[in-house]
Image: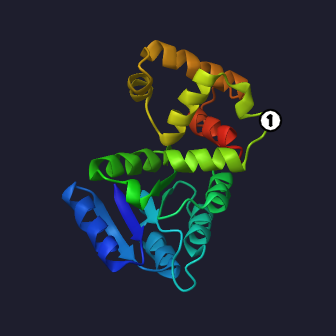
């Protein structure tokens, strides 16, 4: 993957660069503010951007505003928000703007760089990679009676793991059920969320958005 990183903390930024390059990934640019991020993506056309939500000068929502602008300019760009905090409103803004290639991980909970690379790969290919705490807070903040409440308790468990970006095999292992059972639960979720098979939409991502109550 070709990656651009926007992180204002120099030690973390340089550490990410070295770790990703050691895993064979191409880091095209690593910058410390939103304007530099926009310019780097325009220049390098990466597969995915890793963006901190709070960037200079105000350290409020510069990162997510830049991410939304990047999706407007480059619709196929994957965006992985990488933050110390769960910012439910900002995550909702980004997820509502686009239905593919979005992730949100918490810095303190990433303990394995290979898992981080796997998350980047999913986001770059159009999937999702959401920290479980992000999923929990988004569901609570955006709860709609006609969405998640349609699901059975088991389907809710499956849906939460789909939102994290887990494969059917990984979900089966986590819940200690058969993979065929997971496939059946996922199919039921698609039906309850009115998501027919098409050639253009990523149904798992659309299901995540409906489960989270955004989009």
Give the farthest residue toward the right: 145
Decide: is 72 above or below 117: below
Position of residue 42 in the picture relative to residue 156 (left or right): left
Left or right, 23 with respect to 43, comes to left
Q: Position of residue 44 (x, y in %)?
A: 40, 69
Q: Is residue 207 visible?
A: yes
List the single residue furthest toward the bottom: 57
Between residue 206 and residue 158, name the one nearer to us.
158
- Residue 191, compared with residue 118, is above or below; it is above
Q: Is residue 117 above or below residue 20?
A: above
Q: Please say whether residue 100 is visible from this viewpoint.
A: no
Give the residue drawn at x 62%, y 24%.
153
**Residue at screen point 53% across, 68% down:** 53
103 in relation to 174, above or below: below
Which of 142 and 63 lies nearest the eye of the viewer? Answer: 142
Coloured how? rainbow
Number of residue marks: 1
- Screen quadrant of the N terminus: bottom left
SS at mark 1 in the image: loop
Q: Is residue 159 left or right of residue 46?
A: right
**Dot 1 alpha-carbon crowd within 10 angstroms: few under 14, some 14 to 19, many 20 or more:** few
Q: Residue at x 57, y 19 (%)?
A: 185
Q: Identify which residue is drawn at 41% across, 61% down.
A: 107
Q: Position of residue 48 (x, y in %)?
A: 43, 58
Which residue, as the protein is rendered here, is positioned at the far left? 22
In the visual, does 185 lie left or right of 141?
left
Give the residue at mark 1: 145
Q: Nearer the viewer, residue 106 or 43?
A: 106
Place of residue 71 in the rendered image (x, y in percent of width and height, measured from the top left):
59, 61
x, y percentage for residue 36? 47, 80
């Amino acid at each position: 993957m070709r990656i651009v990183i926007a992180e204002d903390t120099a030690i973390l930024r340089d550490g990410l660069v070295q770790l990703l390059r050691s895993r064979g990934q191409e880091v095209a640019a690593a910058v410390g503010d939103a304007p530099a991020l926009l310019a780097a993506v325009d220049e390098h056309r990466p597969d995915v951007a890793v963006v901190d939500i709070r960037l200079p000068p105000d350290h409020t929502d510069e990162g997510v505003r830049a991410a939304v602008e990047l999706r407007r300019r480059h619709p196929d760009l994957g965006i992985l928000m990488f933050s110390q905090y769960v910012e439910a409103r900002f995550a909702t803004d980004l997820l509502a703007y686009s239905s593919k290639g979005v992730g949100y991980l918490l810095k303190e909970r990433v303990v394995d760089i290979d898992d981080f690379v796997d998350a980047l790969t999913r986001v770059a290919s159009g999937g999702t990679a959401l920290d479980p705490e992000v999923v929990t807070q988004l569901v609570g903040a955006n709860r709609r009676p006609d969405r998640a409440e349609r699901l059975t308790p088991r389907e809710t468990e499956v849906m939460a793991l789909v939102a994290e970006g887990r494969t059917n095999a990984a979900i089966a292992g986590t819940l200690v059920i058969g993979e065929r059972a997971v496939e059946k639960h996922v199919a039921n979720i698609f039906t309850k969320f009115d998501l027919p098979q098409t050639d253009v939409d990523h149904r798992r991502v659309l299901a995540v958005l409906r489960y989270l109550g955004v989009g």
